[in-house]
Image: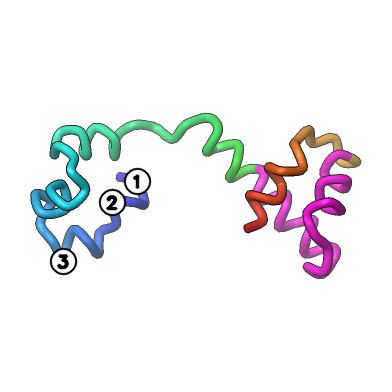
Amino acid sequence: MRDSLHPGEKATYPVTVLCQVLTVARSGLYAWARRPESPRARQNQWLGTHIRACAQEFRGHDGSPRLYRELHARGIQVGRHRVARLMR
């Protein structure tokens, strides 16, 4: 199941209570949890790995504009706003 359906909450609260609080059907919750991760989410994870690697090379002192330029220099096509969002 996805990270949002954290085992800690499931142990503390019954799934029916969680569904009532979130105003979702149990079947919808389980369908969502079984659904594979979207391509965009997988790509964001991959980009996040590269962003962290670049940031470590520059000792974490550079912001998104420099990391954006560095990623482009490495052949990774990504927008500067997306880099900034993933750095947050």
Q: Which residue is mark 3?
A: 12
Magenta stretch: helix, strand or loop mostly: helix
Q: Amino acid at mark 1?
A: Arg
Q: Residue at x 15, y 47 (%)?
A: 19
Q: Secondary structure at mark 3?
A: helix
Dividing the picture into quarters, in which one does residue 81 lie?
Answer: top right
**Coordinates of residue 40 in the picture (x, y in percent):** 55, 33
Q: Left of 25 or right of it: where is 77? A: right
Q: Which residues are magenta?
A: 47-72
Q: Nearer the viewer, residue 73 or 18?
A: 18
Is residue 13 found inside the magenta-colored segment of the image?
Answer: no
Distance (Cα) linking label 1 and label 3: 17 Å
Distance (Cα) linking label 2 and label 3: 12 Å
Label 1 close to label 2 by CB (< 8 Å): yes
Distance (Cα) linking label 1 and label 2: 6 Å
Q: Secondary structure at mark 2?
A: loop
Q: Which residue is mark 1?
A: 2
Q: Which residue is mark 2?
A: 5
**Coordinates of residue 82 in the picture (x, y in percent):** 68, 42
Q: Amino acid at mark 2?
A: Leu
Q: Secondary structure at mark 1?
A: loop
Q: Residue at x 13, y 61 (%)?
A: 13
> The C terminus is located in which quarter?
bottom right
Q: Amino acid at mark 3?
A: Thr
Local crowd size for mark 1, using a 10 Å CA cut-off: few (<14), some (14–19), many (≥20): few
